[in-house]
Image (spheres, rainbow, N blue to C red):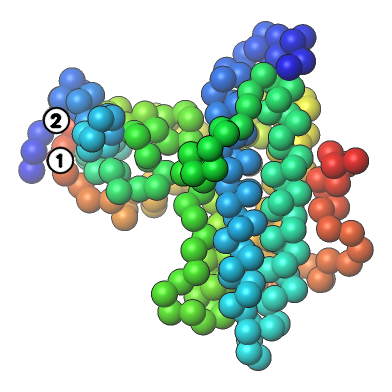
Amino acid sequence: MRVFTKKDLLKYNGKNGRPAYIAYEGLVYNVTESFLWKDGNHQALHKAGQDLTEALKSAPHGKEFLKKFPVVGILKE
Amino acid sequence: MAKVTREMVERAGVDVDQLLELLVKNAAAELTTYYYYTILRANLIGMEGETLKEIAEVARIEDRNHFEALIPRIYELGGKLPDDMKVFHDMSACPPARLPENVTAENILKVLVEAERCAVRGYTQICNMTFGKDHRTYDLALAILNEEIEHESWFSEFLGEGPSGHFMRRGETSPFVSKFLK
């Protein structure tokens, strides 16, 4: 499985045709196909290319939403 | 724009541009839902479908009311709506509530309940952002949230999720949001 650094992850911000990846608890998910991640933005608050482990704690949904997205790698600390 | 209104909200620690984007996205979700529910309601036919038609209609009308109630707040805070309907549709805070491929009352119900659940999450988020900081937006988001929670309950109970804690709504539509529409 591909290993991403936080710097690598930043490139996958969903802008200009690039895929949108986000990290959660060490796994990197591809959310490009999600209607709610258009242009790499989610609900005006979150951007793709980031580790959202902390942010998800205050989201109005849990990690169950990530299950439908493919895992494309792991995030190196 | 209500200049001091925006200033007070900013001073309380709210990122007003971020809040405005959320309000516009939710307004888009309400108006598109109104449109998509029109189609869903039209397809609620037969013995099962006709049973659901009335609450689908109430939810449809109340979602349009939510759209109408959100607009003044967006402009008060210095925001605006896109002048392009397609742009507005595509920025919705929730995915389109499209008619399912296999048109059955149960499948339509699943679309309806998912749309309402998305709305419940969205307004909870706005309430959390504005609580104790932007009293008017909080009051409005809470009023809408109350109605979205009822919509979710109506549809989920028809799907057999637990006993019902309510009776069919009587009287005017939008009992919580109507104060913002006068």
On the rendered image, what quadrant is the C terminus of chain B found in?
top right
* Quadrant in which the N terminus of chain B appears: top right
Front residue (pair B15, A59): B15
In this orientation, does residue A14 appear? yes
**Amino acid type shown at disc 1:** Gly
Work out how far the residue at label 1 is from the one at label 2, CA to CA, in angstroms. 7 Å
Per the rendering, the mark at residue A4 is: 2
- Residue drawn 54% across and 78% down? B106
Residues at circles 1 and 2 in contact by the CB criterion of under 8 Å = yes
Q: Residue furthest front?
A: B84
Question: Image quarter for residue B13?
Answer: top right
Q: Is residue A4 left or right of residue A59?
A: left
Identity, as a three-letter code, of the amino acid under mark 2: Phe
Residue carrying label 1? A73
First in sequence: mark 1 vs mark 2:
2
Q: Residues within 10 Å of mark 1 (few under 14, many from 20)?
A: some
Q: Residue at (69%, 20%) from the top-left corner?
A: B77
Residues beneath discs 1 and 2 located on the same chain: yes
How far across and down, in percent of the image, does residue B149 sit? Answer: 68, 55
Does the rendering let one see residue A26? Answer: no
Q: Is residue B61 left or right of residue A64?
A: right
Q: Secondary structure at mark 1?
A: strand
